[in-house]
Image: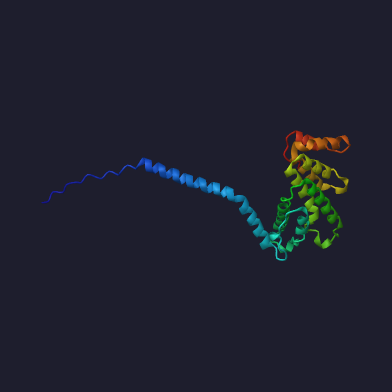
Amino acid sequence: MLEVTEQPAKRPLAPKQGKSLLGFYIALGVVAALVGLGVWLWAPMRTRYRDWQVSTSTHKKGSAHVSVQSADDYLAAIATLELDPQEYKSYQDYWSLVNERMRTWLGVVNAPEDLERLFWACQKRSDAEPEDQGRLQWVNPYYESRNLILYRLADIGTPEAARILVDLRFAPEAGWDGGASLLAGDAVVICGRVALPFLREKLRSGENASRLIELIEAGVKTGI
């Protein structure tokens, strides 16, 4: 009879610790690089997505492809906006996309004096718009531009921009009331401490600027 001898079981090879750690760090580096690339590409991708939304949500006017280089270009660009809510997928899309487009256009206007001139041009055109009962839900781009211009001045944040911003907030001709008044005050608060000298000047001349001064001095980041 053949004698069967048991073969000793083969022990599993110990993992090569050095290579394992190297692979782990390589994988970690790849993940970190992908995350960094995503962060870097986020802003331009978001802008392109917004452009795509505008171009696919409007059918009559090509607002997504308008080039704006100046305040005068901005006024011309407004005429390209599709303002009929029925041309959008939802009213939320309508409001968001129209305002986003105007905000993007204003982003290239950097001179505070140009923004001041643009504000009054929009005010004049808004006042001249006839009231149409059939369009009560439509965005008035000239009226909405006024607050967007104030926020743009707050973003610029120079003393000259702050002076103009405060002057516009307290200009009687602007006719601030209700929600528009709150948004105008919010822009001043966002502008921050650079606006304080001009607010105190308004306070000395009898304007009710004390609340805005208090909010800014308290370090509040929004006035709403």
Residue at the bottom extreme of this rendering? 60
| Quarter-of-image position of residue 62 | bottom right
Label tally: 0
* Residue visible at 22% across and 44% down in the picture: 8
Pick the residue in front: 92 or 46.
46
Q: Nearer the viewer, residue 198 or 190?
A: 198
Whether residue 2 appears in this view of the structure is yes
Q: Name the spot of residue 165 as percent of width and height, x first.
A: 80, 43
Above or below, 14 against 121 in this view is: above
Relative to residue 14, is residue 217 drawn left or right? right
Closer-to-camera residue (51/179): 51
Residue depicted at x 30% and y 44%: 13
The quadrant in which the C terminus is found is top right
Q: How is the image coloured?
A: rainbow
Task: Name the residue: 72% across, 39% down.
Answer: 221
Image location (x, y in percent) of residue 133: 84, 61
Q: Residue furthest left?
A: 1
Q: Is residue 210 visible?
A: no
Q: Position of residue 48 (x, y in %)?
A: 63, 56
Counting from the top left corner in percent of width and height, residue 86 is at 73, 63
**In this rendering, position of residue 96 left or right of residue 206:** left
